[in-house]
Image: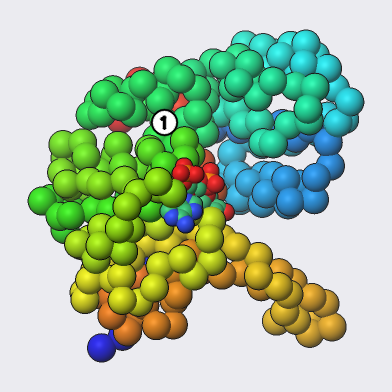
């Protein structure tokens, strides 16, 4: 039987609706709305399209949204001063600096300059530490792993005692999602294995997984015979493998995207599976919005 699809577009939209009603409630009671600033340095087309989507979503949710575009030639000092300005701005609750940054700027310094209580991407070392401790200590879980966990929870997948295997150990996906699944509590309590390019017998590890999370950036890396029948497969990979005509305008070409899992064959074996696109992807922006709302709620001292 074909696997049940975990649709990030649908689950993400449900969460956005929840955020819209919370924003309306907070605005009515306290007269404030969440404020999100996105800082874009230069005009990398992919970065510009991500930032535009984030700003559009924030606008739709009733947030105050600021898109601060800076030239690619901005100095590190000026960028740090700009971050400091937003750190001190009480109407801003989330600061996002779109990565990557030009060569003259040290990304680490920039991330470290963001007030950890406005670091809605969850990349500041203070927030990484909070995530590692877990429980109430966690303030801003990084957006893609938080989206993955939310997809698992809302799809009714049992994580307690489950064997979870994470393919990839990046700081933005692999390591944080492994850390989140190993914590105590809802959507966690799993027995977690992290595999990477130095792992021996990758296929054997994957075959043990009740929950298989793949974030390698290698199209079709996970073969159907690596999947345990009935497993929940979360494919984080987004790989451009060519172009295809756009649905809206067949004369225009758009990127053809593939995940890290051979979807068509894997769906015949898995119990649940995320499609690419439309699986994990839409959840990242959704969780960014949730973190920004949380930042305001923390400021107001409301749950
Ligand atoms: P990354 O920083 O390049 O890390 C990839 C990880 O996968 C590394 O730990 C690497 O191992 C491991 N890996 C690569 N090839 C492997 C192989 N053949 N066997 C075993 N492990 C392998 O990538 P990332 O930033 O985590 O992103 C991973 C994928 O997710 C990309 O396709 C990216 O576009 C996508 N992504 C999607 C979203 C979203 O949907 N919103 C967000 C973030 C990322 P080593 O450490 O040993 O090199």
Image quarter (top left, top right, bottom left or bottom right) of the C terminus: top left
142 over 137 or under it: above or below: below
Residue at left offset 73%, top offset 31%? 101
Residue at left offset 50%, top offset 28%? 123
The spot of residue 128 in percent (x, y) is 40, 25
Residues 142 and 300: in front is 142
Residue 12 location, quadrant: bottom left
Image quarter (top left, top right, bottom left or bottom right) of the N terminus: bottom left
Residue 158 location, quadrant: bottom left
Q: Is mark 1 within 8 Å of ligand 1?
A: no
Say whether residue 285 is visible.
Answer: yes
Q: Within 10 Å of the Cα at label 1, are there few (<14), some (14-19), or many (20+) other Cα atoms?
A: many
What's the image's color scheme? rainbow
Residues 62 and 248: in front is 248
Residue at left offset 28%, top offset 71%? 227
Image position of 256 (left or right of 200): right
Say whether residue 289 is visible.
Answer: no
Q: How many marks?
A: 1
The spot of residue 156 in percent (x, y) is 21, 62
Q: Is mark 1 on a helix, strand or loop?
A: loop
Q: In this view, which residue lies farthest toward the left?
A: 161
117 over 21 or under it: above or below: above
The spot of residue 86 in percent (x, y) is 66, 18
Residue at left offset 25%, top offset 58%? 205
- Disc 1 marks which residue? 140
297 over 258 or under it: above or below: above
The spot of residue 223 in percent (x, y) is 39, 73
Residues 151 and 276: in front is 276
């Amino acid at each position: 039987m074909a696997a049940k699809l975990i649709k990030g577009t649908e689950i993400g939209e449900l969460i956005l609706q929840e955020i819209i009603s919370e924003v309306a409630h907070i605005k009515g009671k306290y007269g404030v709305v969440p404020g999100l600033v996105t800082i874009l340095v230069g005009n990398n087309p992919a970065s510009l399209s991500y930032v535009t989507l984030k700003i559009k979503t924030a606008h739709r949710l009733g947030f105050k949204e600021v898109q601060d575009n800076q030239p690619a030639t901005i100095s590190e000092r000026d960028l740090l001063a700009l971050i400091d300005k937003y750190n001190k701005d009480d109407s801003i609750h989330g600061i996002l600096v779109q990565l990557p940054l030009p060569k003259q700027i040290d990304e680490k310094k920039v991330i470290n300059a963001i007030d950890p209580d406005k670091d809605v991407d969850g990349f500041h070392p203070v927030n990484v530490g909070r995530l590692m401790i877990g429980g109430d200590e966690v303030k801003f879980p990084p957006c893609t792993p938080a989206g993955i966990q939310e997809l698992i929870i809302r799809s009714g997948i049992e994580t307690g005692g489950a064997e979870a295997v994470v393919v990839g150990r990046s700081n933005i996906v692999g390591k944080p999602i492994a850390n989140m699944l190993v914590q105590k509590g809802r959507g966690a309590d799993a027995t977690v294995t992290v595999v990477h390019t130095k792992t021996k017998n990758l296929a054997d590890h994957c075959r043990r997984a009740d929950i298989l999370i793949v974030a390698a950036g290698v199209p079709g890396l996970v073969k159907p015979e690596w999947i345990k029948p009935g497993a929940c497969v979360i494919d984080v990979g987004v790989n451009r493998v060519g172009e295809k005509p756009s649905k809206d305008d067949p004369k225009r070409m758009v990127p053809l995207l593939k995940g890290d899992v051979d979807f068509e064959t894997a769906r015949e074996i898995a119990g649940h599976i995320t499609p690419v696109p439309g699986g994990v992807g839409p959840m990242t922006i959704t969780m960014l919005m949730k973190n920004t709302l949380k930042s305001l709620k923390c400021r107001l001292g409301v749950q």
